[in-house]
Amino acid sequence: MERSEGMLRVLHTQYILSFDAEGNRSDFWKPVLTLFTHPTDEQLKEFSTDSHKALNYLLSDPQNVNSIKQLIAKSRENARGIQDNITKEVWEHVNRLYHWMHDPTFERGLQNRDVVPLLDEALSKTILYIGISDTTMPRGMGWSFMSLGRFTERCLLTVQLSMQQFEEMSYELDTERDILYWRQLLLNLSGYEHHLKTYRSSNTNDNVLDQIILDKNFPRSIKYALNRMEKYLRDVVSNDVTSSLSGQQLYLEFSRFNSQIQFADLQYIRQLGLKSFMSMIQTNLYQFTNKLGQLFFSYT
Amino acid sequence: MIGSDLIHQYITQSGFWDEMSGAEGIRPPYLALLDALKNLNLSDLHEKEALASRLFINQGITFTVYSDNKGIERIFPFDILPRIITATEWQGVENGIKQRLKALNLFLQDIYDDQHIIKDGVIPAALIASCTGYNREVKNIQVPHSIYVHISGIDLIRGENGQFYVLEDNLRTPSGVSYMLENREVTKRLFPDILVGNKVRMVNNYPLLLHNILLSLSPRPISNPTVVLLTPGIYNSAYYEHTFLARSMGIPLVEGRDLYVDQHKVFMKTTRGPQQVDVIYRRIDDEFIDPLVFRPDSVLGIPGIMSAYRKGTVALINAVGNGVADDKAVYAYVPAMIRYYLNEEPILPNVPTYQLGNPEEKGHVFQNIEKMVVKRTSQSGGYGMLMGNKASEEEIDAFKTEIEKNPRDFIAQPRINLSTVPCLIDGKFVPRHVDLRPYALCGPSGIQIVPGGLTRVALREGSLVVNSSQGGGSKDTWIIDE
């Protein structure tokens, strides 16, 4: 659900920006397509310049296993399997969302010239899911796992979107870019207004870096997400009746990794190299999710 | 009925420059738009109108009409068909506005200092002395970078031959820029494909440009000056715009009661304690800004702020006293200012203006009053005007009596046949008169003009009054690269 919400926000921003002159770029949709899916060269060529084709593929193409529709279907299957651990309200909302997306009117909305209403509604429904979970779920193991997953996804999305943007400038932080360059990334992360209100100095590169990695008040920063992950992991491990050593071990490993971020500053990141720093975070996140899955959800 | 029928049934009015249709047929800049509209039927267009209304309402771009103690939210009328101006035409407009603003800035600097322009006999001293916008309190105040007009909206019209004229300069607190920006956002939703295909220049970086200019005007040489937007409050008709601009720039929106002056410095009350304010983008008129200097009954302003301004510890944007430069009587002298200060011929002509304080000009106006538009110099927004061709004998006589009492308070201009553009009204494309307000920003690094502006349209048939208070609406304005 978190991935769907993040992805929908990116699609929304990208679609709105496609109306501006930059939408004429021949590879306008390529970054989004490669970030969220694994298109073939032919698909990439076909969808990169056509907003409607790109959106169709990303939202509902049955061939695309990472489409929003598929993600929601998987969420529903998960929710169905753990109904005893989630509230009735949460289950019903996920179920409603699934049926809304599989109703023919959804497909018809997608064929409209203006897809914004559809994206708006889908985004609202995924955000509503967060609100319903927050207000109805008891703060037990179910909630902790749910939150752990949510913040892991959020952190990964911030890392991946940022790396894509850094890649475009070859990770050259000394090449000054203005806010227009960063606007899309910040809009994707719902952090544009926060940036304008918080950062006043003219070094935009450093400001953006600070916000997306180190800002403890920005709910989509890496630091914020990792902090929340550590809290929910601690709750999971401390509530684990088996008190398994593996759980404690995972918590220690995660905390060591998290410390590198919590005590980092821009100077440290520059010394280490932005690319290495971001890759380190990404690798650690992947390793963590693998171990978490093996420890708590593996049947073998 | 489909779009192609609507286009064929479009009938222009003789004697007016229609921006879409001329003697040679449809003008080239409109061809692509019309081509896209051809296949839409009337219900598609009505759907787009309904969508535009919904978007304005959802974003809170409304004003409240109080009737029977019920607040009814209304939107400002918006016509969905965009107005198109080519990049070549725009270049002339841009050059003309830049030239005009340079001269007006030099005029303000001069008039509040040595007054060479009066001493050299270019502008009569009596005219300046009679301007309500001339503030003796700001004489000799040094403003940052000698810039007085930071934010301006210059009202332009197109005459019978398509020539642009300057109708009015707005150099105090010009409003409407949020409508320019929101109109574009709405048009993106209405005509997404057409917008991209027409190479329309972007306007959405206006708040960033404005923010950069505000930061650059800080009197304190610090990296993070505090910039605020000062609003009269929620009951002001432009309050939406104040909130919109503050949010778009990420700066605090404050009222007079949120600020105070201590030791000739302005501070903002915050939950973290007082914070010194460096730059104030004020949307309050001069007369309300400081009750100790101007109107003592003002509760909107900040007592003592003028002392801080005089000391140079705070920048007020726009500068206090700009009203003298956009006075309707001084307007007639702007071409002379351009020649005097810049030694250049004006790029954008004025509408010919008669000073009714001059007996000869007054006589000429009285003789030809049916061809004239008479305006009070102290009023704006379409109020205090007499349209000679529409007024009754009684109204004309009443105006003449008022003019005789105080002729300096009036100017007259020959009625210009404002250009027309197509509007969708009652299921038809019909021509309606428009003006254009481009917004210019002036900072230490020069003048920047966002490619576009607010097109105001007189939605009533035959009306030449475009003001929203008088039944006007607005349109998106496209500057297209050919």
Image (spheres, coloured by chain):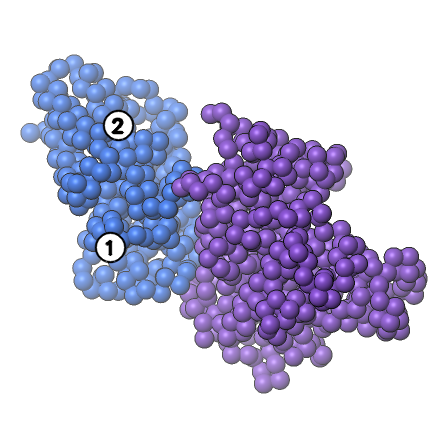
Q: Would residue B221 appear left or right of A249 to someone viewing this image?
A: right
- Front in this rendered view, residue A198 or B24: A198
The quadrant in which residue A235 appears is top left
Instruction: Look at 48% across and 70% down and name the residue there.
Output: B480
- Whether residue B208 appears in this view of the structure is yes
Left or right side of B100 for A17: left
- Secondary element type, mark 1: helix
- Please identify which colour was used for chain A in the image: blue
| Chain that is purple in the image | B
Q: How many marks can you see? A: 2
Task: Give me the C-alpha separation between circle 2 and circle 1.
Answer: 28 Å
Residue under the image location 64 percent in, 57 percent down: B110
**Image quarter for residue B312?**
top right
Q: Residues within 10 Å of mark 2 (few under 14, many from 20)?
A: some
- Which amino acid type is marked by label 2? Asn
**Farthest residue, direction bottom:** B24
Q: Residue furthest left?
A: A300
Q: Nearer the viewer, residue B209 or A219?
A: B209
User: Dot 1: within a 10 Å radius of its alpha carbon, few (fewer than 14), some, or many (20 or more) residues?
Assistant: few
Question: Does B118 sit above or below residue B22?
Answer: above
| Quadrant, the C terminus of chain B | bottom left
Q: Nearer the viewer, residue B391 or B367?
A: B367
Q: Earlier in the sequence, mark 2 or mark 1?
A: 1
Q: What chain does mark 1 sit on?
A: A
Residue A128 in the image, given as x and y percentages of width and height? 40, 35
Asked whether residue A82 is in view, the answer is no
Residue occupied by mark 2: A227
**Residue designated by label 1:** A168
The picture places residue B282, in percent across and down from the top left corner, at 60, 43
Nearest to the observer: residue A100 or residue B460: B460
